[in-house]
Image (spheres, rainbow, N blue to C red):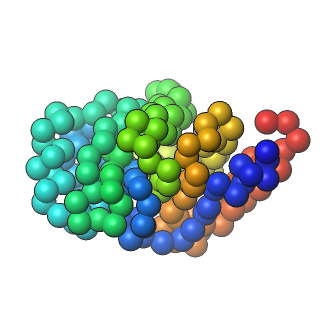
Amino acid sequence: METNLKERIQIVEGDITKMEVDAIINAANTSLLGGGGVDGAIHRAAGPELLAETKTIGGCPTGEARVTKGYRLPAKWVIHTVGPIWSGGYGDEDELLANCYINSFKAALEIGAATVAFPSISTGVYRFPLERAVNIALRETKFFLQNNQSIKKVIFICFGSDAYKKYQEVFNEVFNQETH
Ligand code: AR6
């Protein structure tokens, strides 16, 4: 079971806009109208049709997720989720970040996505400490995959080698524990 679980997770260094998966996750803001970082990259690669669709949604609260089509992206769908802005850990940031993963997985199930790719939500402009965020990402993913068989592959896209090393390190901690 554990072996099977590990095989369903991949950590790669790269650009999420290039991923040929059913759905990529976007680290958006509550307006869903685009921005910098990975959000800006996804909007640029998807084309203006993406903004036209997100305008019809009317925003998304922190921790929740909304689905659009992928337009010019190789991915069929984009699941937009809004991470918390780090404010020292006193604003339920851990729980809100966990909700981003939980709600993105729920959205993936609803659209029948079997392969999904995540960026490191909240760890850029929103300043969530990387190691803490990666722990939450991998623990929520482990829990979800243990309870759901329909998602076959979860890929974590690391932007740069520091992020890649951190994901590898935390992955070994989270998946080599005796108890889970
Ligand atoms: N592919 C994969 N990861 C990327 C890419 C890419 N093309 N570009 C950046 N990253 P951020 P946040 C990484 O700032 O912290 C936006 O303006 C980046 O290195 O994109 O959740 C939104 O509109 C970092 O590790 O998202 C919001 O206003 C990770 O993606 C705000 O930023 C997330 O960094 C959201 O901030």
Q: In which quarter of the image is residue 57?
A: top left
Residue 144 x/y as whole percent: 61, 37
Q: Residue at x 54, y 71 (%)?
A: 13
Residue at (79% x, 45% y) in the render: 1
The quadrant of the rendering that contains the C terminus is top right
Q: For the point 49% across and 46% down, which residue is it?
A: 128
Q: Quadrant of residue 21?
A: bottom left
Left or right side of 162 for 70: left
Residue 19 appears at what percent x and percent y?
Answer: 42, 67
Residue 44 in view here:
yes
Between 43 and 113, the one nearer to me in the picture: 113
Report if residue 86 is visible in the image: no
Q: Is residue 145 left or right of residue 58?
A: right
Q: In the image, is residue 12 above or below residue 69?
A: below
Question: Which one is nearer the viewer's eye here, 15 or 133?
Answer: 15
- Residue 34 place in picture, x, y as percent: 22, 52
Residue 27, given in percent of the width and then of the height, sits at: 37, 49
28 relative to 25 in the view: left or right? left
Q: How many labels does the image show?
A: 0
Instruction: Kindly indicate the quadrant of the structure image that contains residue 148.
Output: top right
Compare residues 159 and 177 and report the one nearer the observer.
Answer: 177
